[in-house]
Image (cartoon, rainbow, N blue to C red):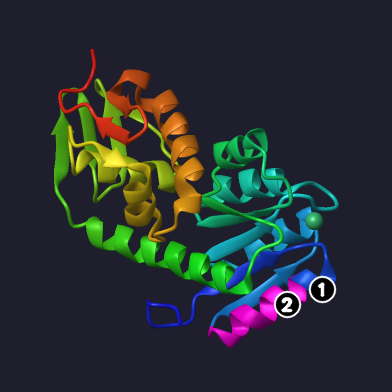
């Protein structure tokens, strides 16, 4: 069940009718309000009409693909996106993450895992709202405003995706501490599964590109740490 009172609305985008309906039925059985789309243009239109809380998005779609759908809907307002992909290669995942997807599941997936990932992503959104009460954090020349969800590097504002921001907030809450990929995935994505470690790597890569590569230190074979003083 959704954690935030009223049933969360989920947009399911999948061109394979059997999979679309099976996913929809399962999510409705778990108490969610589900709306459906079967192609790229339809997904963008449904998103605008129904204002879902989360989007389940197949990559290969008629019209235009899931990456383009993700880019278009994220341009309007940030929304958690769980990508469904048939290809488990790194390039595909990176492209997906680069346009604002929060997590991915490789087909074939278990319905139980899909429902658990959806619940975890929605919990994360709730937790992010709670964290909004936190004060601004200054780490050297890096400033993180948790309430406004804004970030500045040497006085210049940097625009992060919701996932990049949550990741930075977690790192900034533990400056200088080496955090394992498993712990980061459990804490930021809210889903303690080792399968998410590559998701963490991809998002750290995207975050580094925006805030400066040397601010996030790689501890080989262990994980990552935010440099407490920031870089110059
Ligand atoms: Ca497809």
Q: Nearer the viewer, residue 194 or 202?
A: 194
Q: Pointer 2: what residue?
A: 22
> Label 1: few (<14), some or many (≥20) within 10 Å?
few
* Residue 185 percent coordinates (x, y): 39, 51
Q: Residue at x 57, y 74 (%)?
A: 112
The residue most toward the top is: 232
* Residue bounds of the magenta highlight: 20-31
Whether residue 65 appears in this view of the structure is yes
Label ID, residue 8: none
Q: Label 2 CB, ligand 1: below 8 Å? A: no
Judging by the rendered image, the residue that carries numbered circle 1 is 18
**Looking at the image, which residue is at 36% across and 56% down?**
186
Label 2: element kind = helix
Determine if the magenta segment contains residue 193: no
Question: 179 or 190: which is nearer to us?
Answer: 179
Is residue 27 covered in magenta? yes
Residue 227 position in % (x across, y down):
21, 26
Between 30 and 77, the one lying in front of the other is 30
Element type where label 1 sits in the image: helix
């Amino acid at each position: 069940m959704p954690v935030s009172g009223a049933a969360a609305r989920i947009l399911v985008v999948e061109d394979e009718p059997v999979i679309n309906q099976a996913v929809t039925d399962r999510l409705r059985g778990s108490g969610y309000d589900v709306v459906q789309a079967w192609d790229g243009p339809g997904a963008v239109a449904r998103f605008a009409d129904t204002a879902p809380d989360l989007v389940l998005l197949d990559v290969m779609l008629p019209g235009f693909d899931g990456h383009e759908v993700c880019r278009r809907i994220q341009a309007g307002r940030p929304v958690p996106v769980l990508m469904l992909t048939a290809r488990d290669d790194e390039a595909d995942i990176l492209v997906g993450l680069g346009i604002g997807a929060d997590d991915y599941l490789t087909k074939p997936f278990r319905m139980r895992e899909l429902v658990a990932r959806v619940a975890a992503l929605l919990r994360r959104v709730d937790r992010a709202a709670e964290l909004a009460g936190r004060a601004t954090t200054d780490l050297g020349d890096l400033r993180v405003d948790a309430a406004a969800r804004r970030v500045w590097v040497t006085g210049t504002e940097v625009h992060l995706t919701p996932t990049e921001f949550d990741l930075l907030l977690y790192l900034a809450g533990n400056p200088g501490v080496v955090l394992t990929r498993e712990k980061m995935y459990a804490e930021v994505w809210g889903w303690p599964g080792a399968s998410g470690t590559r998701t963490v790597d991809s998002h750290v890569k995207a975050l580094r590109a925006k805030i400066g590569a040397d601010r996030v230190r790689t501890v080989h074979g262990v994980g990552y740490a935010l440099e407490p003083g920031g870089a110059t």
